[in-house]
Image (spheres, rainbow, N blue to C red):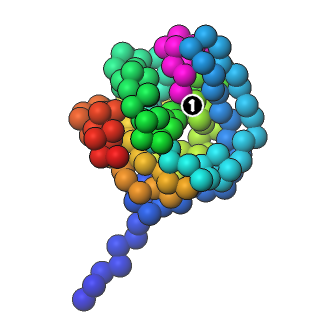
Amino acid sequence: MLKFIPKRFLHVGQTIPQMNLTIVSGNEQKYNIEKSVDSIKFFGNKKIVLVGFPGAFTPTCTGSHIPEFIKLNDKFKEKGVEVVGLAINDPFVLKEFGEELQASIPFICDGTMNFTKAIEAGVDLTAHALGFRTRRFTALVENGTITQLNDEKGATMSDVSKAETILRLL
Ligand code: BEZ
C-alpha cells in the first residue's frame, strides 16, 4: 500500500508564499533598505538563485559562501539568473554586510523569521548561540516556484550549496 508522505521542509515544486519582504540592495559602495516588497512581485517572471545562509558576518558566510556568489555573479547574469541572499538578520546588519563585502547582490532580510518559517527553511542553531536561523541552501526559483534545490539541511557548508555547484546545474 502506498503511504502518504507529507511534504515538509523546503522542496522542489514549492511556491513562494505571498508576504511583505524587506530587501537590501545596491552596488559595491552603497546599499538601500526597501520595506514592504511583495514577495510574488519580487519572484515573479524571474529566475532567481536563492541562497539561504545562517547569518551575516559568521565566519563561513563571510569568508567563503557569499563571496563565491559575488565573484561568480556575472556568470549567473549571463545565464539570465539573479542571485538573492536570504538570512534571519535585520536590514541594518545585512546592509552593512552587503557594503562590507561590496556584494552587489540583494538580500532578503528576514528579521521577523516569517519568510524562513513559511518556506520551512530554518534550523535551530541554539547550540552555536545563534538561535533559529535560515539554513544553508541554494534553490533555483523560477517565476515563484522552486525547480532545483541543494539543501545542506543545517549550517555547515559542503559542495552542495556552493555557488559553482548551482551554476553548473543551470
Ligand atoms: C558560519 O561560520 O557561517 C557559522 C558558524 C556557526 C553557526 C552557523 C554558521
Residue highlighted by disc 1: 107
> x, y (%) of residue 1?
24, 89
**Magenta stretch?**
95-105
Residue at the far bottom: name it: 1
Instruction: Identify the amino acid type marked 1.
Output: Phe
Q: How many marks?
A: 1
Under circle 1, the secondary element is: strand
On screen, residue 57 versus residue 162, left or right, reads right
**Residue 113 appears in the figure:** yes
Name the image quarter holding residue 111: top right
User: Up-down: is 69 above or below 43?
Assistant: above
> x, y (%) of residue 15?
53, 60
> x, y (%) of residue 40?
65, 53
What residue do we see at 68% from left, 50% from top? Answer: 41
Is residue 101 located in the magenta-colored stretch of the structure?
Answer: yes
Residue at the far right: name it: 36
Q: Residues within 10 Å of mark 1 (few under 14, many from 20)?
A: many
